[in-house]
Amino acid sequence: MHELGIVFYIIRDVKETALANGVSRVSAVVMDIGEVSTVVPEYLTDCWRWAADKEDLLRGCELRINTVPAVTHCGHCGKDYGTVEYGRTCPHCGSGDTWLVQGNEVEIKEIEVID
């Protein structure tokens, strides 16, 4: 389960940002998690609750997850399509000349603070 390691990185980054901005309490962290990122949102949330509650800055802080759909682009026909549904082969032209455009993200999108 690599989600716990990811949570430790999120906490580190949130703490650094809070310190740099004079924030004493964070109420929520919003993440963008790609559909094919290999991160399991439920595991991330469970790990978050365990680790965040050990930090005064983050005690009770909510972790919100936005799922970013995986989209692949075909270099042959120029069309985009849903990666999860069709994989690496373009459903429009059958080409394998494709690449992932989005859907592999694991990013902090927002940090909400308590005034």
Image: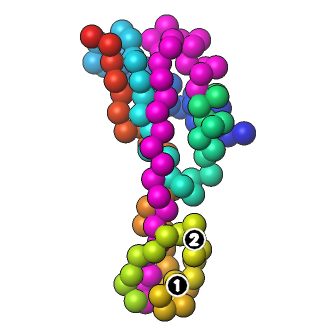
Quadrant (top left/top right/bottom left/bottom right) for the C terminus = top left
| Magenta extent | 48-76
Q: Residue at x 41, y 76 (%)?
A: 80
- Which residue corresponds to mark 1? 91
- Observer able to see residue 12: no
Q: Is residue 98 magenta?
A: no
- Place of residue 27 in the rendered image (x, y in percent of width and height, measured from the top left): 40, 18
Say how many tags the image has. Answer: 2
Q: Dot 2 surroundings within 10 Å: few (below 14), some, or many (20 or more)?
A: few
Taking the spot 43% from the left edge, 20% from the top edge, the residue there is 15
List the residue tagged with mark 2.
Answer: 85
**Mark 1: few, some, or many residues within 10 Å (few <14, many ≥20)?**
some
Which image quadrant for residue 4?
Answer: top right
**Could you tell me residue 108's position as x and y percent?**
42, 37
Magenta stretch encompasses residue 57: yes
Q: Is 86 situated left or right of 77 in this image?
A: right
Q: Secondary structure at mark 2?
A: helix
Disc 1 residue type (three-letter): Pro
Residues at marks 1 and 2, CA–CA distance in whole angstroms: 9 Å
Element at label 1? loop
